[in-house]
């Protein structure tokens, strides 16, 4: 299970060849590719704790531990990195503001447990029901409304330093347009560095916490608390993680020329366990990372050995409190600029799922499903009853599922809706 056969001579790859998950290159090359995976996940993985207030070093530690756990549970058959999940940002932020970080961690932990249980269910019954419950119009609507629901938060940060935020925003755009290869893939990180440099010149960065932090030490740990009234805000995230995992497993399967559908249950369970474990100590929730899938696509190296290297490297980096303190010096203006891009991209991923799924928007059920969901999410419609608060993401998700299935069912009964087979799953691109 934890042995890899050497690919060829370990130093070269034929133009039409790939390095399969059970193979590896020579260790110096494998370590180099593992370092690329660390760079690919680094920017997005650290943005989540920056936006939620969770400790960055703890997030990095459990990102590495979660990745190693994922590789063990999937028996080294699915190359993937578990980085911070953006799908949780809205419920975490709302929970922290209305209660505490501990309450937010409790919501994340419960979500992780539910995802793990869902993974066990998928292992037993397969993935067919996912396409029935969430066809492309439903899945795309849920992902889109989560991205657009963040817009007010991004604007609040943007207003705190409009100049720095604007520079950061355009730096990300220009780096994406100008650079190819690895530089193009880390354009968000480059944009943050450029914006950070401008913030330093404008006197917006306080380096005191960095000077006071130790070079070596354990991360900052926090523990979860449980507030039942906040849990409904987290439940829609399970659906997003479900789609994300299925999409990424499908993508990896296509690239490695093998059917990995039988592994979806294990990937969901391992992601859920990693998320719950991280929340137990104050780290951010995890998810499989599209950025790292992009690195595999570019290098054609799918060796899980590289992911072991990346996971171990993340754990070692997390043991420097000075790194975490440096990350937390990034000012609101930089965050405002970069989140304008990231939150918009999350929304567009949902739109892309409509396109890839060939959603027919001439059909009323699709129009109503997507239209109502987006309005509820963007307006952040909030209902409170019995001590339970449902925000725009939770209500938008419920509206999406109810409207689609009610209209679809009634349409079949009345003959106004044709009976069609569920569309094939599409692979969403991860937001980070």
Image (cartoon, grey):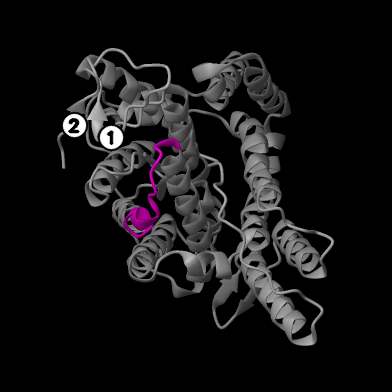
- Identify the mark at residue 142; answer none if there is no mark: none
Tell which residue pokes out farthest to the bottom in this image. Answer: 413
Residue 403 falls in which quadrant of the image?
bottom right
- Identify the mark at residue 4; answer none if there is no mark: 2
Q: Which residues are magenta?
A: 255-267
Main secondary structure found in the magenta portion? helix
Task: Report if residue 187 lies within the magenta region.
Answer: no
Q: Is residue 299 left or right of residue 28?
A: right
- Identify the mark at residue 304; answer none if there is no mark: 1
The location of residue 87, given as percent across then percent down, is: 53, 51
Residue 63 visible in the displayed image: yes
Q: Is residue 126 left or right of residue 420?
A: left
Secondary structure under badge 1?
helix
Residue 309 sits above or below residue 265 on the image:
above
Estimate the spatial distance between the alpha carbons at disc 2 and disc 1, rounded to whole Å: 9 Å
Q: State if disc 1 and disc 2 touch (CB < 8 Å).
A: yes
Give whichever of 252, 31 is nearer the camera: 252
Residue at 42% x, 17% y is 15
Task: Report if residue 262 lies within the magenta region.
Answer: yes
The location of residue 216, given as percent across then percent down, is: 22, 26
Residue 33 sits above or below residue 386 on the image:
above
């Amino acid at each position: 299970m934890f042995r890899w056969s050497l690919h060829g001579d370990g130093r070269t790859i034929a133009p039409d060849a790939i390095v399969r998950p059970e193979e590896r290159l020579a260790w110096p090359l494998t370590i180099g590719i593992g370092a690329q995976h660390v760079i690919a996940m680094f920017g997005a993985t650290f943005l989540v704790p920056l936006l939620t207030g969770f400790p960055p070093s703890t997030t990095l530690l459990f990102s590495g531990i979660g990745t190693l756990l994922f590789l063990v549970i999937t028996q080294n058959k699915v190359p993937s990195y578990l980085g911070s999940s953006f799908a949780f940002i809205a419920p975490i932020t709302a929970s922290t503001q209305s209660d505490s970080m501990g309450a937010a961690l409790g919501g994340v932990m419960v979500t992780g447990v539910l995802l793990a249980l869902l993974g066990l269910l998928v292992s037993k019954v397969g993935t067919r029901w996912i396409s029935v419950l969430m066809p492309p119009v439903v899945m795309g609507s849920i992902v889109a409304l989560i991205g657009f629901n963040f817009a007010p938060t991004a604007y609040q940060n943007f207003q705190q330093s409009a100049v720095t935020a604007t520079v950061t925003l355009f730096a990300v755009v220009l780096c994406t347009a100008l650079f190819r290869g690895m530089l193009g893939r880390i354009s968000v990180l480059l944009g943050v560095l450029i914006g950070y440099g401008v913030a330093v010149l404008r006197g917006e960065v306080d380096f005191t916490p960095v000077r006071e932090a130790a070079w070596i030490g354990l991360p900052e740990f926090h523990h979860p608390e449980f507030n039942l009234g906040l849990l409904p805000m987290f439940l829609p995230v399970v659906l997003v993680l479900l789609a994300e995992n299925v999409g990424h497993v499908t993508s990896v399967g296509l690239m490695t020329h093998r059917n990995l559908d039988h592994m979806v249950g294990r990937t969901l369970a391992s992601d859920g366990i990693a998320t719950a474990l991280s929340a137990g100590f104050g780290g951010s929730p995890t998810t499989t990372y599209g950025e790292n899938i992009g690195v595999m696509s570019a290098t054609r190296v799918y060796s899980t050995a590289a992911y072991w290297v990346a996971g171990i490297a993340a754990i070692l980096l997390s043991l420097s409190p000075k790194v975490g303190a440096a990350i937390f010096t990034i000012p609101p203006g930089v965050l405002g600029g970069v989140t304008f891009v990231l939150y918009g991209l999350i929304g567009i991923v949902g739109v892309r799922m409509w396109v890839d799924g060939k959603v027919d928007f001439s059909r009323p059920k699709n129009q109503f499903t997507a239209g109502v969901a987006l309005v509820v999410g963007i307006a952040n419609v909030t209902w409170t009853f019995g001590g339970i608060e449902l925000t725009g993401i939770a209500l938008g998700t419920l509206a999406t599922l109810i409207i689609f299935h009610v209209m679809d069912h009634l349409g079949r009964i009345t003959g106004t809706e044709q009976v069609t087979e569920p569309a094939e799953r599409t692979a969403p691109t991860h937001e980070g």
